[in-house]
Image (cartoon, helix red, strand yellow):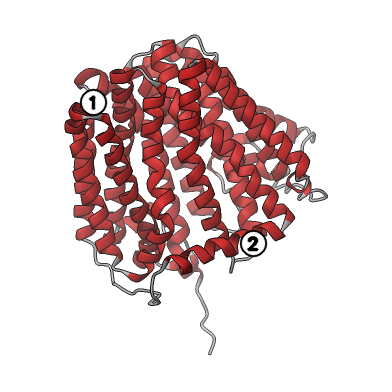
Amino acid sequence: MAVVVQPEEQRQAGFTALMRNRNYALLWSGQLVSELGNRFHWIAVSLWIYSLTHSASAVSLAISSMFIGSLLVSLWAGAFVDRLNRKAILIASDLARAMLVALIPTLVEVNLILVYVDLALVSVATAFFRPAIFAVIPQVVNRRNLLSANSFFTAMDTGTEILGPLLAGILAQTYGYTPLLYMDSFTYVFSAGCISAMTISHTPTQRERINLQSVWSSVVEGLRYVKKDRLQYGLFVLIFPATIVGAGLNALQTPIAKGIVGITDAEFGTFQGVWGVGFVAASLLVGWYGSLLRRSRIILAGYFIGFAATGLMGLSSSYQDLLVTAFVVGFSNTLYYVGLSTVLMEYTPSVLIGRVVSTRQVALAAVRVISPLVFGALAELSGIREAIFIMAIVGAGATALTIWAHPSVRHFDEGKQPTNLGRPAMTWVIGGPIDPEFPELPQRALNLGAVTITAIGWGGIALRHPGPAFTLLLVTLGVAGVGTILRRRGWLP
């Protein structure tokens, strides 16, 4: 007998309803505090190491250490998560990270090599934590509420991306770097406490023996599929230029900002927060107007805009230059990341997507470890500005070469008509739904939540630096407004 699902049962739960779920409320609250601490961690480590060494290569080695765990154990971590007690993995990972982060102030005084080893161990613990938390969310939330549950996690992560660096910069300038690391250590303990209070059943989905051959075979199988499909192979190659530049810029942004432009720690926090504002602004604009453009154009535009902004960041001579270029880099990163993720989901068979993603993650992890080392060393030899500019040129050239060698990446959506959802005005779009496949009310709430997070972050920047803040606001509203006017006049579909 068929079960008739009533409309009430199909509705996505809002944030208040989800927070009535004790397990979800504990998990979300723990991660809110923990993610805020992660922003403190990045600010403290990068600024502290640079203040001690004034060396781009020293900071680059720290950045590489933060990603080494993903390269070494991410595939194995996923296998363990499927077989062992996920709650225990989450708690153990948090407590291990708390202890390791708390050791950093002491290790800094002994030897920086010990700091790099410590950061690598933190990244190993994180490599176990991330797949475990993604696996736990479906255990604590009904399937029909997964969209809302994941969306509120994303909103929380974005909020800490904007507000965390702003607060960390102010605290670093006022109290130094040691308190930031101890605060980050405490946030891991808090997260572990929240998780320990949750009720999570232990139901391992797989029981076969874990071995290197079985885990690696999934990557090989994914790579074989990618190589056989022209579009998949082109997209696979296309991820490398942006990752090379992004990882290299992670390592060189501290030397350019502190060593060349000479900004304060508080200003560095604002500089980091502006990246998050660019991310949110692009996310909203892609949601509002992305259906009017071909995805291939969104992806490639994001690439080349990002490379141009990276080169200009290397030429920055003032704090204002850094803020504007950081906003554009964050904005462009979102364009190609959202576009590539969407195309990957649309064009990859569901039975293969896990293996394809694993293959991509291994490749990306390798680049994120190697790129900072290469460009950090180049910065020591040729100068920081020159290294950033060369990095941007390499990224743009490699992307152009990939487009020429793999024309499928720019032709895969030819002939497809952009979707016209008939939105009447920008003011309605801000609060309205962006995807007709999902319920309207949760989308309205999430849109308004994203706008609120952006407004709070912008307000923090405006209090300290009103000129750049209003410039960013005018640019964002200008793009959105022009799009609305062009649609009203029929110049856009």
Type of residue at label 2? Arg
Which residue is labeled 1 in the image?
Answer: 177
- Which one is earlier in the sequence, the residue at label 2 or at label 1? 1
Q: Residue at x 33, y 21 (%)?
A: 50
To which quarter of the image does residue 429 belong? top right
Type of residue at label 1? Tyr
Cα distance in 3D space between marks 2 and 1: 47 Å
**Residue 428 in sight here:** no
In the picture, the disc for residue 224 is 2
To which quarter of the image does residue 86 belong? bottom left
User: Circle 1 — which element?
Assistant: loop
Towards the viewer: 460 or 200? 200
Of badges 2 and 1, nearer the viewer stands 2
Q: How many labels does the image show?
A: 2
Residue 476 x, y percent position in the rendering: 57, 27
**Residue 339 in sight here:** yes
Towards the viewer: 163 or 113? 113
Residue 272 x, y percent position in the rendering: 41, 27
Residue 217 x, y percent position in the rendering: 52, 66
Q: Which residue is drawn at 67% across and 39% down?
A: 298
